[in-house]
Amino acid sequence: MVTSFFSLIIGIQFISPLKLHADNTYEIKQDGKMIVRGKIIDSSGMPLPGANVTIEGTTKGVVSDADGYYVIEAEKGDVLVFSFIGFKEQKIKVGDKSAIDVIMEEETTMLEETVVVGMGTQRKASVVGSISTVKVDELKIPTRSLTNALSGRMAGAVVVQRTGEPGRDEADFWIRGISTFGSNRTPLILVDGVEREMSNIPVEEIESVSILKDASATAVYGVRAANGVVIITTRKGVASKKPSIDFRFESGFADLPDMPEFLDGPNYAMLYNEAFGREHYSQEYIEKTRLGVDPYLYPNVDWFDKTFKKYSTNTYANLNIRGGGEIARYFVSLGYYGENGNLKNFPENEYDSKY
């Protein structure tokens, strides 16, 4: 280890074409900038070619060569940012240092991250097929359908919501678009290894969501996976001394922002006469409609206002209890979601007009 570090110092001095002063510092240019050099290695002393070296807050940067060396022009107050795939990002202030060597630390959490594939899990670094995963915390949004929650959060997932009707607002879900000509165009959906729908699965019950997109990832499922595979793993019980209790409650409202506006009865009748150049509606009819003399004979009703309300409310509550011991473990989930929609209800009717 000492030998590799010592050779690193020798290497920096050997490739430097700049003239050193007596105090071993590099010459500073008239504009206040200086040349900063160094070598980027990993924890075992191996050079890292292709590592990025940028000046924080700017777009100026360089890439290390095949031996891990870099050269960049900077000022004393600049901060150098060192980054490389699979390693932790480091920031070092230049100051009076003209030679900065960096030992990059591996990002073990990224390398050891696992994804669900086929009949089990693998390290993400060893997976060749195209697989996308999403964190459950990113799905906790105020929506009933899981398909709507996945919209815009997974690469390759195409989500199209046809209607906002309460209870029927689940979206069409495809992986990389429509791949077949037949009637079965949806991906294979497996929840804990069992094929079923995923629209009504509460987010609080989910441990992980993965989608398999290409042939190398879906080959184990055969022809049924021609449109991709969605693998959902639900939460399980854990061994703990005390049960873990989670409760979530949300309440919100939805509005109809683009409600159309129509003319009232009298103005409609006058414009109708003007458009056709004749008196289809008499002045007596127009005046009685304006005064509301007989609402049945001379109706003047805004049916959108009578039928729809601008705002509706929704309520979501979920209670999870998780625990167990070495022999038995449990996970219990109780959820409720209510949404009344934007249709008005009339108590005098014998039926409920709300969705």
Image: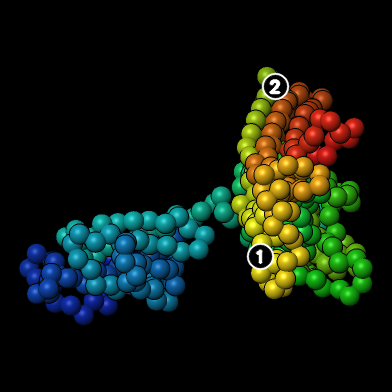
Q: Amino acid at mark 1?
A: Leu
Split into 4 quadrants, where in the image is the N terminus? bottom left
Q: Which residue sits at x=77%, y=43%? A: 295
Q: CA distance from mark 1 to mark 2?
A: 71 Å
Q: Residues within 10 Å of mark 1 (few under 14, many from 20)?
A: few
Instruction: From this view, report whether residue 90 is shown above or below residue 227.
Output: above
For residue 212, side relative to residue 77 (left or right): right
Where's residue 131, x and y in %? 70, 62
- Residue in front for this viewpoint, 92 or 200: 200
- Tag 2: Cα neighbours inside 10 Å, few (<14), some, or many (≥20)? some
Of 120 and 286, the residue lying toward us = 286
Residue 243: image tag: 2
Q: Earlier in the sequence, mark 1 or mark 2?
A: 2
In the current view of this chain or complex, which residue is farthest to the left? 22
Q: Position of residue 144 (x, y in %)?
A: 73, 43
Q: Quadrant of residue 252?
A: top right
Quarter residue 172 falls in: bottom right
The reply to whether residue 202 is visible in this rendering is: no
Residue type at mark 2? Pro
The residue identified by callout 1 is 271
Give above or below for 103 relative to 204.
below
Horizontally, residue 133 falls left or right of residue 170, namely: left
Task: Please provide percent x and percent y for residue 50.
Answer: 44, 72
Query: In the image, which disc is placed on residue 348?
Result: none
Left or right: residue 278 versus residue 194 is: left
